[in-house]
Image (spheres, rainbow, N blue to C red):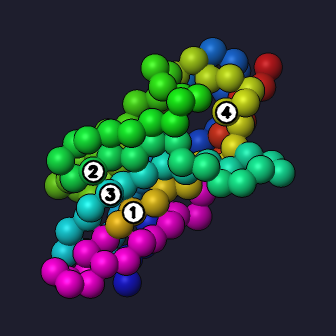
């Protein structure tokens, strides 16, 4: 089994910053892609940013230049630095990881989510 746990959410004023962390633990052979998704009230879950094991990154257009994704492969962790936050960034942020449990066993896991609220 693999556990995925996020932390770092909270209430922040517009223009502020937060750093989200996600840790994957358990029977992990290796981790491929790690990503952050978010779901705002009444909206579908959307991809925010993703990072591959070799460090290649992809961002949603709405967060380019403001958010930065990074990872620590040795610790099976992924981070999301959120800068210049706007009220539209308010959402529950979810960590998503593609895990090899063995060389030929791949599965995707989600965390429970961490809430980010941007409000004055």
Q: Earlier in the sequence, mark 3 or mark 4?
A: 3
Distance, label 1 to label 4, CA atoms, is 21 Å
Residue that numbered label 2 is attached to:
52
The percent coordinates of residue 47 (x first, y second) are 54, 48
Asked if residue 59 is positioned above or below residue 26 in the image, the reply reads above
Q: Does the image show residue 44?
A: yes
Q: Earlier in the sequence, mark 2 or mark 3?
A: 3
Tell me the mark number nearer the camera, choosing from 1 and 2: 2
**In the drawing, does residue 40 fall left or right of residue 70?**
right
Q: Earlier in the sequence, mark 4 or mark 2?
A: 2
The percent coordinates of residue 25 (x first, y second) are 33, 69
- Marks 1 and 3: CB-CB under 8 Å? yes
- Marks 2 and 3: CB-CB under 8 Å? yes
Front position in the image: 101 or 44: 44
Q: Earlier in the sequence, mark 1 or mark 4?
A: 4
Mark 2 is surrounded, within 10 Å at the Cα level, by few (under 14), some (14 to 19) or many (20 or more) other residues, namely some
Residue 89: give its label: 4
Residue numbers of the magenta segment? 99-113
Q: Does the image show residue 8?
A: no
Q: Main secondary structure of the magenta part?
A: strand
Q: Quadrant of residue 102?
A: bottom left
Please state, as top left, top right, bottom left or bottom right, where the N terminus lies in the image. bottom left
The residue shown at (25%, 75%) is 100
Residue that numbered label 3 is attached to:
33
Distance, label 3 to label 4, CA atoms, is 23 Å
Residue 97: give its label: 1
């Amino acid at each position: 089994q693999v556990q995925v746990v996020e932390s770092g959410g909270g209430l922040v004023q517009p223009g502020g910053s937060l750093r989200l962390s996600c840790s994957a633990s358990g029977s992990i052979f290796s981790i491929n892609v790690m990503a952050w998704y978010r779901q705002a009230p009444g909206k579908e879950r959307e991809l925010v940013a993703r990072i591959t094991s070799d460090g290649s990154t992809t961002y949603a257009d709405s967060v380019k230049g403001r958010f930065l994704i990074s990872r620590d492969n040795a610790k099976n962790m992924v981070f999301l630095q959120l800068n210049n936050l706007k009220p539209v960034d308010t959402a529950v942020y979810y960590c998503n990881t593609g895990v090899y449990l063995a060389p030929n066993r791949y599965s995707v896991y989600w965390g429970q989510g961490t809430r980010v609220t941007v409000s004055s």
